[in-house]
Image (cartoon, rainbow, N blue to C red):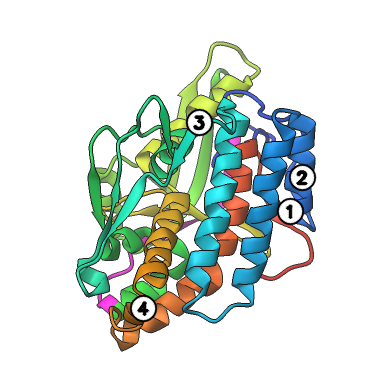
Amino acid sequence: MTELKEKYGFPLFTKETNLVYLGHERKLIISDVWAFWDYVIKKKNIDKKFLLSLLEQAKNFYNAAESAPLNTKPLLFYYSFLNLSKIVLNLEHNYGQHIHYLHGISERNNNSFRRSGVTLQPIEKDKIKVASELYRLFNGVTIDTNTTINLKNLLSHCVGIHRAYSEIYRVSESFCKLSNVLYFKDGKEIGIKAKVQCDGRDITSLKKLGYHIEKEEGIPYLIESLNIDKYSPTRQDYYALSQQLIHKGVWYYVGDDGYKMYISKQKQHRYPTEMIIYWTIFYLGSITRYRPNLFKEIFNDMEQWLMSEFLTTQPKQFLYLTTAKMLGQKVLKAYTSF
């Protein structure tokens, strides 16, 4: 068995083909994410004027949100993410500026956060439902009917605020961290092996959810492997194995020392990281836009702390994870603190 190089954004961000070639065998460390997006748009060279105007708005809204009061942040962050998402969809599909863009999502406010939700709208041929289109692009899920998601349930898999969530709602933590991650090749087999940091009683739950876990010297390891046609794995092989793992469920966040990965022992509400952040920001932005007087009223005292944690930490996660998803490469920010 030999160790494989980390390439193609494996295992979290692998795409079947390059969207923009930026060196497939290395992670990208950037100091100015907005200047980097400017470069990507210019290098892709499709409808530059339109996409650069979207980028300018995304950047200005984001920068304004970072210095805004807490109850003003959500709307500014949402419009930043909406414009960034339009750029992503156009880089992938080249929809252009003349097609009709819609939010693709609506809020369902029931006068308390834990009873409220968002409704994803079905994809249409002649209109771009941004929230649903982004979900399909990033996660391969097609929304074909109105789909309502409870916000409290949605946040149960927001890994960046999970400990605060578990404390506030008095539930057990769902995530088991993966560490000592190894990518390997053994003949015509490639795989990923990682130590699972969890209680022994959690192993049964994880196995029931489809994770392949084996013990070595009493230590549980997640092992996912794939048989390939040749001895040298191709980009398609990396992609197939990454999809095998992601479909079983893996959550992640980026920090100062790179990406951390987790698997979940919770059976329900297993939504992907980027979409959890996007949908929640939309809901909070809708409240601050249409019912600003309710922003504090719909949260109890403890939930206000949770929202503060979310708005302080998760927008930056969305920005960097979306960039990595779009490129199919790991993206890190130089000289910063998450």
Real-space Cα separation, disc 2 to disc 1, in angstroms: 6 Å
Q: Is residue 217 visible?
A: no
Residue in the image at 49% along x and 29% along y: 241
Circle 2 — which element? helix
Residue under label 1:
34
Is residue 167 found left or right of 181 in the rendered image?
left
Residue under label 4:
295
Q: Do tag 2 and tag 4 residues touch (Cβ < 8 Å)?
A: no
Q: Do tag 4 and tag 3 residues touch (Cβ < 8 Å)?
A: no
Q: Which residues are magenta?
A: 169-184
Q: Whole-percent x and y of residue 84?
A: 59, 48
Real-space Cα separation, disc 3 to disc 2, in angstroms: 23 Å
Residue under label 3:
99
Mark 4 vs mark 1: in front: 4
Circle 4 — which element? loop
**Three-letter amino acid code at the position of disc 3:** Ile
Residue in the image at 73% along x and 37% along y: 49
218 in the magenta segment: no
* Of callouts 3 and 2, the N-terminal one: 2
Residue in the image at 38% along x and 77% along y: 292
**Three-letter amino acid code at the position of disc 2:** Asp
Real-space Cα separation, disc 4 to disc 3, in angstroms: 33 Å
* Of callouts 4 and 1, the N-terminal one: 1
* Of callouts 2 and 4, the N-terminal one: 2
Q: Do tag 2 and tag 1 residues touch (Cβ < 8 Å)?
A: yes
